[in-house]
Image (cartoon, rainbow, N blue to C red):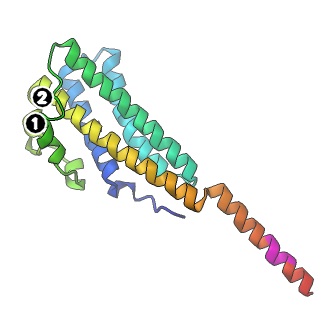
Amino acid sequence: MYRDGGYQNLLVYQLATTIFDLTAIFCEKYIDKRSRTHDQMIQAARSGKQNIAEGSLEKSLKGYIKLIGVSRGSFGELLEDFKDFLRQKGLLIWSKDDPRVVEIRAIRESPNLANLANWANSPYGKYLDKPEDFANLMIVLIYKENYLLDQLSRSLENKFVNEGGYTENLFKKRLEQRNADGKMRNLN
């Protein structure tokens, strides 16, 4: 097997966990709990995270690649929700050159950060008090996540091209076994 299911150690999974947790906090603070948007944002963040975990546990490399694509789609949907929130509230979407964006991009994700109970004490804490800051923080994190997902997808596609997929490799092993069995019969 080409993976050991250690998805928790992947940076892409750790950041997805952070995005999921912070999205839940954002929605509790700023999105009406009775609205469809509240549930959809949390479900998109959850789907993004869970598909990384599920994909890494797939035997099929093709299945893993597909689930990474589903994760990417979920985070794309969530990104649009945060942009819509800012636009509808008349708040700014920070440019990629904004010093706050540069600062957020420089924060390194880690397992400790992804497992925080009190986000106010995290490097992201100063962005959690104002809706414009919080939504822009989430936009930057989702862009980082999408970049990491794209890198993972390319890596998995290269692995598939160079090593083949699960079914293909099983078939090769079966042919090798049949050939070995045939040689044994011919020796007898």
The amino acid type found where label 2 is placed reads: Asp
Which residues are drawn in magenta?
A: 178-182
User: Between 149 and 124, which is closer to the camera in this rendering?
Assistant: 149
From what the image shows, is residue 118 above or below residue 162?
A: above
User: Between 178 and 97, which is closer to the camera in this rendering?
Assistant: 97
Q: Position of residue 58 (x, y in %)?
A: 53, 52
Q: What residue do we see at 42% from left, 38% from top?
A: 71
Label 2 vs label 1, nearer the camera: 1
Q: Position of residue 176 (x, y in %)?
A: 75, 71
**Mark 2 or mark 1: whose residue is earlier in sequence:** 1
The amino acid type found where label 1 is placed reads: Arg
User: Quick one: label 1, few (<14), some, or many (20+) residues within 10 Å?
Assistant: some
Q: Position of residue 158 (x, y in %)?
A: 50, 55
From what the image shows, is residue 140 above or below residue 160?
A: above
- The answer to if 184 sits in the magenta stretch is no
Where is residue 88, by image quadrant? top left
- Where residue 113 is drawn, which disc sits there? none
The quarter of the image holding the C terminus is bottom right
Marks 2 and 1, how far apart at CA: 9 Å
The quarter of the image holding the N terminus is bottom right
